[in-house]
Amino acid sequence: MNNNKDSSPLKNPLVIFLIISVVATILLNAAMISLQGSQKKEISYNEFITMLEDKKVDEVIISKNEINIYAKPAKEESGEMRLSSLLGMGSTDSNNREMFYTGYIYDEKLIDKLDAADVKYSTPVEHENPILSFIVTWILPLVIIYLLFFLFMRSMSKRMGGGGGIMGIGQSNAKMYNVEDATGVTFADVAGQEEAKESLDEIVDYLHNPAKYQAIGAKQPRGALLVGPPGTGKTLLAKAVAGEAKVPFFSLSGSEFVEMFVGVGASRVRDLFKQAAAKAPCIIFIDEIDAIGKSRDSQLSTNDEREQTLNQLLNEMDGFDSSKGLVVIAATNRPEILDKALLRPGRFDRRIIVDKPDLKGREDILQVHIKKVKTEPDINLHEMALATSGAAGADLANMVNEAALRAVRLGRRTVSQEDLMEAVEVIIAGKEKKDRILSEKEKQIVSFHEVGHALATAVQKHTQPVHKITIVPRTMGALGYTMQMPEEEEHYLMSKDELLDQITVLLAGRAAEELVFNTKTTGASNDIERATELARNMITMYGMSDKFGMMGLESIQNKYLDGRAVSNCSEETKTAVDNEIIRVLKERYDIALGILRDNRDALDEIAKCLIDEETITGERFMNIFDGVKEKRLHTEENDES
Ligand code: ADP
Ligand code: MG
Ligand code: ZN
């Protein structure tokens, strides 16, 4: 919100607030004045004198710059109609006297005239204290508006999960974090993270019964750090610990500090620990701790606010008495940038890895989420788990929901296996784009391209079987794709042969285009990117090239996010690496071309089938392929005889 970068005054809520208040106050006063004015009728001074002479005036109040005139009440029996009451102006006072006013003119004889007309006259005594009246008309409305605005902002920011609001600058008593007395989440809601759960179990047990640990003199770790890629269930796990231990859950997000006013972060941390200590046993959860816990020396530009916050956090973690049952859990996906001081014993010394789930883990997670939707009896979550290698828990939860949405869209009451598998593809490749019509020529090119991939998969030994080939365009850019799926169990290790075969498969799409149409299209760009990355990793990180041997030329920077690699070698070596990559890719491309040339008959036949049907299953693909091979064998035999 306020990052100091943002210097436009209109973006500053304080300025907006001031403008609103001043305008509102002015309007309020203007409205009051016009309201007062509307009850009286203005007349000219000589009209007043005429009224006076006609003896129509009952009373006159002369103030500094105007004369207020009260006419004698009209006599009902006279039947005289008063103009202003006809007009519905209601310009009478409580004594039913019509009210007029006129400007004050210095008139020596006025008193005589008033006496002559037997009129009561007076002038108001200045009771009014000018300071008081200023306060009432100007300061009070400002204060009231300020208060309203403040309350509004506070309720807004509370709803947004924080507290304090913009007016709470420097106030430490405003709540600035979330408290849940019961999270309602248990370990049963978290699947596929058995090791993490085991590590956290001890904390749960400790929160249940701190005395047991104290009796033996064991000190409970003060903090645990959950480390892993986004969406793997770190937040969920922390909540589950609180839920299992049945203790309150205090949570705040590291990123919220950075956008706050200077000085607030530290006071927030102090306040959080104070409040939590009062409610102990409980859990404090700091999400995205890397936002505050960034290593202090790695910064080019320093961020005072963050540093203060971090210092306060370090302070509090040293200070609190863990025997009370206060446990701090933090989560991050960038553990390598955390300040060393945070990780030393007595602080976040327990590191719990929450990695992406394996095959069994994925099946378990799906099992958890599938319970939330109505399904047909014959769904096969194992198949779905096989097809979702690399997906995190959040992705899987999303897929189940996506499948349910599809079922609703198609007017069904239960989720079918087809919905689930389609949802997997939607997450991987985007929604089907049936309205994008490919031209006949494009359709042919895409078909041959995809069948090229599929054939390279089928012919080579170290590959995963083809699951499906389709040329129905998807929203995420693919005009068609070939889906591979492992048969059973997942691989944790990849051999050099497997990687090389994979590169061949990726390049076989373009090889088919070139072989059949003698053309090169943009459809291969993603294949090229992935093939190049594989080849580079083989050389720079896996020690799989003869030329560079075991030298580590690159290292991964943030393992749990994008996994970007940084180079550790000289410029010359980099050039040599590039040349080596070019060589590998060329070699694999030629192999792909060779495979397709040898199987040209199958390529043509399967592509023709794909153009007609748009989507074929892996099974059908293998059937056609086997059929073609059989035919080939026959003709060869016939040729020989
Ligand atoms: P993180 O904090 O690691 O980024 P979250 O804990 O916020 O991820 O997970 C987001 C959602 O994904 C959860 O609310 C849950 O629905 C689902 N999810 C993630 N991991 C799991 C898991 N291991 N078991 C069950 N659901 C999970
Ligand atoms: Mg999270
Ligand atoms: Zn391709």
Image: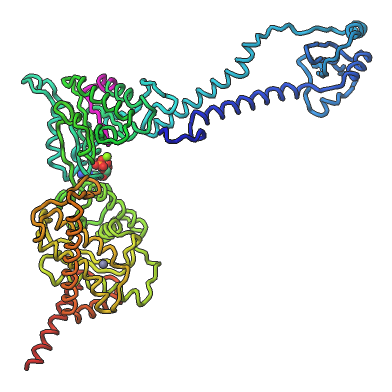
Report which quarter residue 85 is drawn in: top right
Does the image show residue 184?
no
Observer-nearest of 104 and 279: 104
Residue 550 seen anywhere in this rendered image of the structure: yes
Where residue 146 appears, as percent x and y from the top left, is: 52, 23
Quarter of the view holding residue 536: bottom left
Q: Picture quarter containing residue 70?
A: top right
User: Which range of residues does the magenta coloring cover?
Assistant: 274-288
Q: Is residue 88 above or below residue 69?
A: below
Residue at x-position 36% and y-position 31%:
162
**Placement of 533 over or under 220, stated as above or below:** below
Q: Is residue 324 left or right of residue 16?
A: left
Q: How is the image coloured?
A: rainbow
Horizontal arrangement in the rendering, residue 191 relative to residue 65 (left or right): left
Residue 285 forms part of the magenta stretch: yes
Name which residue lies at 90% across and 17% down: 51
Q: Which x, y percent locates residue 514?
A: 26, 76
> Does residue 221 sit above or below 333 in this rendering?
above
Left/right of residue 268 with respect to residue 573 in the rendered view = right
How many marks can you see?
0
At which x and y percent is residue 126?
A: 71, 7
Quadrant of ligand 2: it is top left
Q: Residue at x 37, y 33 (%)?
A: 259
Image quadrant where one finds the N terminus: top left
Q: Is residue 18 magenta?
A: no
Q: Locate residue 68, reporting x and y percent.
A: 80, 15
